[in-house]
Image: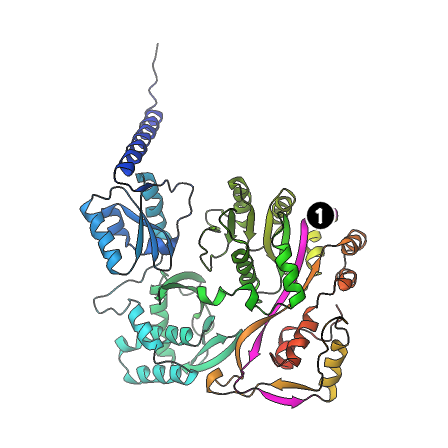
Amino acid sequence: MTIHFDEEKQEQKLESLRKSEEEELLRLLSAKYNVQYIDLGPISINLEALRIIPEQISRDAKIIGWDKIGKRLKVALLSPQNDATKKVLKDLEEKGYEVTVYMAPTASLKKGWDLYKDLSYAIKSKAGAFEISNEDINDLLGKMHSVEDVKKSITEIVSMKKSLKISKLAEIILAGALALKASDIHLEPEEEKVRLRYRLDGVLNNILNIESETYSLILSRIKLLSGLKLNVKDSAQDGRFSIELEGDDIEIRTSILPGAYNESIVLRVLNPNAISVPLEEMGIPDRLYKTLEREIKRPNGMLLTTGPTGSGKTTTLYAFLKKVHSPDIKIITIEDPIEYHLPGIVQTQTNREKKYTFASGLRSALRQDPDIIMVGEVRDDETASIAVNAALTGHLVFSTLHTNTAAGAFPRLIDLGINPKVVTSAINVSMAQRLVRKLCPDCKKEITLEGENKNLIESIAKTLPKDLPEVQTEKMWTPAGCDKCHNTGYKGRIGVFEAILTDREVEKVILDNPSEREIKQAASSQGILDMKQDGIVKILAGTTSLEELERVLDLKDDV
């Protein structure tokens, strides 16, 4: 009789036995050392926490960072008695981190080590030419208070004509963006120059032009910082890096696109403070605010926020989550990307390369016994189907859709293959929003309403619900510009909103004729302002301007 020895199978059994024995031993040791035991297998590792300890040090000391909120850092380690591990812990404390220690098996540490390849680091030279300096950025921030300050700093460096100094332009450009609270940095090559623009309060502003030769050094530096290939110039590349600012990690998402004259760069600034806006401060009208307060406390159903890219939908979802979060409920998010870390909430990030999509993430989240699920966006029929079914089976689901109006969410879901009866049963509220710039309180100018503007505003004001306080229609305010608003006339942003509840009237229309116009008309009896009405109220109160509202809404559109 021939005996077949399956070496691979035996090795798998031995490996399983070794893992089991190690876990058992670590549980005993964790009790002995009074250190909590953790298995990171089912837990999402925060890449910003992982980044704190360099990979080689992490491997040598057998320790990884796995969660981080501000300066509070959670680490997993194999042994707290290891000298190299002790040194890492001491270094972290000296850097101001409040460290919570967990003991974890080797498999958990390997999970973290495998993720280091997803991080981007600058290649450092002895001269420090390719090393991002948080200290430099923080120093520069103290000197930059206006667009003119940014221009002056860049011009001074360029005039020195020294490549090492010019390489520091990346820090100046980043510091300027952070000082002015820009959401995006655009570097756009043209035939004889490169244009630098910041997106401030949702609008692109020209900062200055940079010489093409100087730009080549900036481009190389940003590629290195973002972990991108220097020699690839004819295809798009995406990367990222982060900056620590006053205890917060600000992630910079890099997009590079080949162009006619050179590669263009867009840097997206993901500042957690910019997206952390309480629901009370978003400019939601009183009646709608009370409605939302009630609806986000329901045990099941779906709340949708709709609008184009950049309309503040994600900020609204985060505000919902912070409002409903409590120790007795489980909340899971599927995001792309995670823009703000929320304590006590399980946040996951989609990864196309690993086939972790909104749909697959949602399916997995439902197996984790959640009470509330936040899905970054319903993009396809599969995600729509799973999200709607989750809302019908005892979960509260928050998500976003790309439609222009609150009424448009219903036919959009039907287009994605959801049965109209299911849509009306699942959706509690559909809300649409836009962001408008707020007039600078220091320089806004009062003018008398007249002519076409007066007719337009009065025609919309007449449609306001009768039980609202009467609004004046004699005057409005326009932007002027001063030092405090960088001469734009605007300072900060506020939302304009509308929402539709799925009541009996709306349900009947959706089942009979799911058109936006009919749905909106059926919802008019709910007494909730639409975006045009909300915008006009904010214009007449001096919060924003007519031209700003017209930038984001077609005020003459009947739908």
Question: Image point 64% across, 47% down: which residue?
Answer: 388
Q: Is residue 308 above or below residue 47?
A: below
Q: Amino acid at mark 1?
A: Ser
Residue 357 is left or right of residue 42, and the answer is: right
**Residue 81 occupies which quadrant of the picture?**
top left
Q: Position of residue 233 (x, y in %)?
A: 40, 65
The residue closer to the viewer here, 522 or 59, is 522
The residue closer to the viewer here, 50 or 155, is 50
The image quadrant where one finds the C terminus is bottom right
Residue 454 is left or right of residue 124, and the answer is: right
On the question of residue 404 being in view, the answer is no
Residue 370 is left or right of residue 195, and the answer is: right
Q: Position of residue 500 (x, y in %)?
A: 70, 60
Residue 431 sits inside the magenta stretch: yes
Q: Residue furthest left?
A: 83
Residue 171 sits inside the magenta stretch: no
The image quadrant where one finds the N terminus is top left
Give the secondary structure at mark 1: helix
Q: Which residues are magenta?
A: 421-449
